[in-house]
């Protein structure tokens, strides 16, 4: 295979001939061992933790990464909240956006979509999100030549303890070596995710460093709680013997007291007795340890998820919504940073290897969608649709997750709509004018097929039959001013002087007469 002239995002050349060989593999000896017998958390105390964190901040983070791994294995609460944060990101739908609508850009985007839809892609996301706890995570694509193109057939997670940061900047990741100098990572070989959870060195940004003190204090509290339960879970047992008791009798009594703790039964000579004494100052000890463990769990939840309402406690729906907004902010940031890593270390490399360097590249996007109140949406849309707002039916169906009805399928309809469908609306007569403006004349009445109207409807229809002549003396001055005015400001300024030109006497007289007729008609129909 010919050597490639492509470069990675940092401008370093990528050699295709080396991609078919794995960069780093586990071994039974040397630096890259998959098994580790050393436990850090078993001997953890404040002095030991300080030494571990200080060493990690100065370049030696092997013990710190071991501690971070053991924290996930030994603390159920930390494992739960950290897993919640990671799965919230890895479960997001991944889409691919083309650089433009150009046919070539669409073709590149389609190739990247095949990468995203592969089953091993989602597993790789879980591996990269291990960086949230430890500060960084590394996955190696295993490339294979298929149909003349290089495709990643799987992604291998590499132990973060196999790497170290350079001693100068503390930002550039290197392979560990026997001598401790560090080996430079060849370009295009690894996917390195370093989430920016805080400013500064990446190794100091993982939430494991933030939670380590709470983990240690909680471990101490649990040990003390177990000792307390062992000592004070049962009352103090006191054996009493008389002044004439022999050594053998005392030994029997001692064994009887000891057996009460294990077997809850004992045999002793007559004349001896055992008393059970409650320890007064131990009454609140159990609550003290429980409150301490719960408080430390809340601190861990705040450090990992930014809130406690959705994990440890919750008092009201409004408070839970506020805390959930904080969680969504963290989710958006995690998804944005992970997508940036994928676009830099995977998409760009894949496109360059198979299609050559591009001016623009497709992008992987992890979509964060907020839950939508569909009832509020339906209540808000109804009045607007009734007023003529055009809304595409397919968009509303997608919002509610409903499929478009097929031809001939039974369709649910409102009850009033079904009644109107069974009874067609009365048709307008055939002699309606083309429009109902003042210039075209009066609107024609509906034909005789309309439903029968009552006396009040007849009264209204009769008075409105000649509304055009009544309104002309009022509207003609306004229409004349509108035709004469050159600008809207001229029209607005002339409105105040139109009152004297309007003749509303006929309109007022007709309205007064109509009101009198309506009142008289109402009195006649309701004699009370």
Image (cartoon, rainbow, N blue to C red):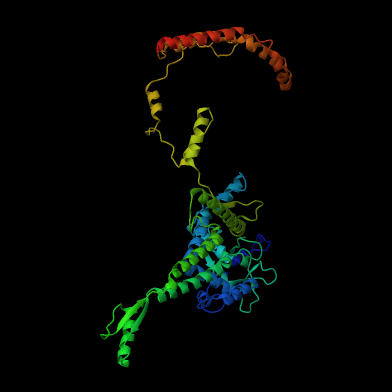
Q: Is residue 130 above or below residue 508?
A: below
x and y percentages locating residue 451 in the rendered image: 40, 14
**Quadrant of the image containing the C terminus:** top left
The reply to whether residue 143 is visible in this rendering is no
Q: Which residue is at the front of the view, 477 or 506?
A: 506
For residue 320, side relative to residue 252 (left or right): right
x and y percentages locating residue 155 in the rendered image: 52, 63
For residue 508, side relative to residue 272 (left or right): right
**Quadrant of the image containing the N terminus:** bottom right
Q: In which image quadrant can residue 210 be found? A: bottom right
Q: Is residue 173 above or below residue 240?
A: above
Q: In which image quadrant can residue 351 be found? A: bottom right
Q: Is residue 198 above or below residue 106?
A: below
Considering every residue shown, the one lying at the far left of the view is 270
Considering every residue shown, the one lying at the far front of the view is 243
Q: Residue sitting at 64 percent across and 62 percent down?
A: 4
Q: How many marks?
A: 0
For residue 96, side relative to residue 256 (left or right): right
x and y percentages locating residue 354 in the rendered image: 59, 57
The reply to whether residue 516 is visible in this rendering is yes
């Amino acid at each position: 295979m010919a050597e490639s002239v492509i470069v990675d995002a940092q401008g370093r050349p990528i050699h295709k001939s080396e991609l078919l060989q794995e960069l780093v593999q586990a071994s039974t000896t040397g630096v890259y061992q998959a098994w580790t017998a050393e436990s850090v958390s078993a001997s953890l105390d404040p002095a030991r933790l300080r030494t571990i964190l200080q060493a990690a901040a100065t370049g030696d983070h092997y013990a710190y990464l071991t501690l971070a791994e053991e924290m996930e294995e030994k603390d159920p609460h930390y494992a739960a909240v950290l897993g919640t944060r990671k799965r919230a990101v890895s479960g997001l739908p991944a889409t691919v956006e083309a650089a433009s609508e150009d046919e070539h850009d669409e073709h590149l985007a389609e190739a990247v979509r095949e990468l995203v839809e592969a089953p091993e892609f989602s597993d790789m996301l879980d591996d990269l999100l291990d960086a949230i706890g430890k500060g960084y995570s590394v996955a190696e694509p295993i490339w294979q030549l298929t149909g003349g193109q290089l495709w990643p057939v799987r992604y291998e997670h590499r132990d973060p303890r196999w790497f170290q940061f350079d001693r100068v900047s503390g930002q550039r990741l290197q392979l560990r070596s026997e001598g401790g100098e560090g080996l430079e990572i060849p370009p295009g070989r690894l996917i390195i995710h370093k989430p920016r959870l805080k400013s500064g060195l990446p190794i100091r940004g993982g939430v494991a460093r933030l939670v380590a003190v709470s983990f240690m204090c909680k471990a101490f509290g649990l040990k003390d709680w177990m000792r307390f339960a062992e000592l004070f879970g049962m009352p103090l047992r006191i054996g009493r013997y008389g002044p004439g008791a022999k050594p053998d009798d005392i030994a029997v009594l001692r064994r009887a007291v000891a057996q009460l703790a294990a077997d809850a039964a004992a045999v002793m000579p007559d004349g001896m007795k055992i008393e059970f004494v409650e320890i007064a100052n131990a009454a609140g000890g159990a609550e003290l340890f429980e409150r301490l463990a719960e408080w430390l769990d809340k601190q861990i939840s705040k450090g990992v998820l930014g809130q406690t309402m959705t994990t440890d406690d919750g008092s009201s729906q409004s408070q839970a919504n506020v805390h959930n907004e904080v969680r969504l902010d963290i989710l958006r940031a995690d998804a944005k940073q992970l997508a940036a890593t994928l676009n830099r270390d995977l998409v760009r490399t894949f496109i360059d290897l198979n299609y050559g360097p591009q001016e623009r590249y497709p992008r992987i996007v992890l979509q964060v969608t907020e839950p939508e109140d569909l009832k509020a949406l339906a209540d808000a849309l109804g009045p607007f649709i009734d007023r003529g707002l055009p809304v595409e039916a397919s968009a509303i169906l997608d919002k509610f997750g409903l499929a478009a009805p097929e031809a001939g399928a039974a369709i649910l309809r409102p009850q009033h709509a079904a009644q109107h469908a069974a009874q067609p609306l009365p048709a307008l007569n055939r002699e309606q004018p083309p429009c109902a403006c003042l210039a075209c004349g009066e609107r024609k009445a509906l034909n005789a097929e309309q439903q029968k109207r009552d006396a009040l409807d007849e009264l209204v229809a009769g008075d409105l039959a000649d509304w055009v002549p009544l309104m002309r003396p009022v509207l003609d001055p306004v229409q004349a001013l509108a035709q004469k005015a050159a600008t809207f400001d001229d029209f607005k300024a002339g409105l105040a002087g139109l009152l004297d030109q309007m003749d509303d006497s006929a309109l007022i007289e007709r309205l007064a007469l109509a009101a009198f007729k309506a009142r008289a008609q109402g009195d006649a129909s309701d004699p009370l």
